[in-house]
Image: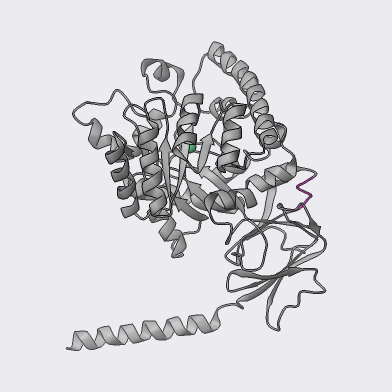
Amino acid sequence: MRKQCTLLAAVFFALFSAGQLAAQSPAVVTLVKAGRLVDPRTGNVLSPAAVLIEEGKIKEVGSPSNVQAPPGAKIIDLGNATLLPGLIDSHTHLLVDPIVPAEAERSRRYNGDFVPGLLFAIVESPSKRVLMGAQLAREDLESGITTVRNLGHSGIDGDTELRDAIKAGRVPGPRILASGRKLITRGSYIQSLNPALADAILQQEFLLIDGADRAREAVRLNEFQNVDVIKVTADQNLTVTELAAVVEEAHSEHLKVAVHAVDKTSIQTAIDAGADSIEHGNQVTDEQLKQMRDKGIFFDFTPSFYGDFFTRLTEATVLMSPARRDRWAKLDVSDTQTYNSLVQHVLKSGVKFAAGSDMGWYFPGKTRGQTSVSRFPVLHLAGMPSLDVLRAITTNAAEMLGWQDRIGAIEPGKFADLVAVAGDPIADITELERVRFVMKDGQVVRNDLASH
Ligand SMILES: [Zn+2]
């Protein structure tokens, strides 16, 4: 009895304290003022600009003379900075950061650069892995990414749990649309496993598609984990029937289907099965782009290795012969030219497009956020106008995610997810790599412009 009384007292005290905290919490109305505000959808620039925020949502946008803050509102003056909607990275992997293996290691195994690190991630402690995910999520947010779509490589529930922990305010990070386990055909990813353990290992990370029934079951298993999107890797082994079964099952639960497809055959499978977005799409043809446009399928650019990214990534960490380095440097040049041509073809086709970093690498000396945002301005180097780059990671991405009603633009009713850069991002898109102010849900994440 006495114990119960103590417990009750503790509960009352906790409730009382919570009430006090709420009463003392800062004003829920905030006015953000800045020299300029760019609307990526229209390209219009509002100068000067004011954004009124209430309860984490945007209430009003206009010139400072028209948007009045009620008494007691918190005022954040960002001086001459330029406001943009919070950035959306529509293709990332927050629960992996492998290091490319040294050349000697690489030549002895058959699984490529990514797989040794991936295998390690699977067999390591899931608790350790999700804590790393929390760090990478925070780093993305600090660089201005307020929403990500995490497309696999997260264990069974790493991304859904991280999403929920961020939502509950336990750890800082972007909004996450989580895919749960990636649907693959046998042989798509890790090979040469111990046959006695292979299935058990694979199931920690992937769901195997083997016929239409198993494809539907895979979607349902992910639904049980409460995922936001279904991710499928299409290769030459995946049939249209199997992928169509995935799409039908996912759509019946209002989930979109993002399909990794690189070669022409896989891209055609994704188009014929009615995918919602095609990830990577490197070898897409003009005829396929036309079909995608007619069906409203999004093209999601992932310029992860554009330029000399891979060379720089491996420089500091990977033991490699000068001959191999030389070969890779040459590949950097030819791959970059190929990507430039891809960007031109996609832009000309009129297909809907967005962009993601596809980041899943450890880059020495950089935070994950710095590495992720460095992949957006390279689209401009590849020939995409700055405004289209901004659209690809704001308004367009929001539409691809099906979240155009809540993110991607600075408009009344949307979440107050804002970033600011010091200069003009249209004149110099690399400003995206120097985000000075980040707000998510009306809460300031960072403000390096505070002296104004
Ligand atoms: Zn990916």
**x and y percentages locating residue 362 in the rendered image:** 50, 36
Q: Nearer the viewer, residue 33 or 41?
A: 41
Would residue 216 be found to the left or right of residue 57 on screen?
left
Would residue 304 be found to the left or right of residue 245 on screen?
right
Q: Nearer the viewer, residue 437 or 266?
A: 266
Please tell me in which quadrant of the rendered image residue 205 appears.
top left
Q: Which residues are magenta?
A: 422-426
Please report the residue visible at 67 percent of the width from the left and 22 percent of the height from the top: 337
**x and y percentages locating residue 100 in the rendered image:** 46, 27
Q: Is residue 423 magenta?
A: yes
* In the rendered image, the vertical position of residue 41 relative to residue 416, given as above or below: above
Q: Nearer the viewer, residue 295 or 42?
A: 295
**x and y percentages locating residue 14 in the rendered image:** 37, 81
Would residue 414 be found to the left or right of residue 270 on screen?
right
Mark count: 0
The quarter of the rendered structure image containing the C terminus is bottom right
The quarter of the rendered structure image containing the N terminus is bottom left
Q: Nearer the viewer, residue 245 or 177?
A: 245
**x and y percentages locating residue 82 in the rendered image:** 76, 56
Please report the residue visible at 34 percent of the width from the left and 49 percent of the height from the top: 222
Q: Is residue 210 magenta?
A: no
* In the rendered image, the vertical position of residue 441 relative to residue 120, given as above or below: below
Say if residue 394 shows up in the picture: no
* In the rendered image, the vertical position of residue 265 relative to residue 20, given as above or below: above
Say if residue 127 shows up in the picture: yes
Please report the residue visible at 36 percent of the width from the left and 35 percent of the height from the top: 241
Please report the residue visible at 49 percent of the width from the left and 30 percent of the height from the top: 268
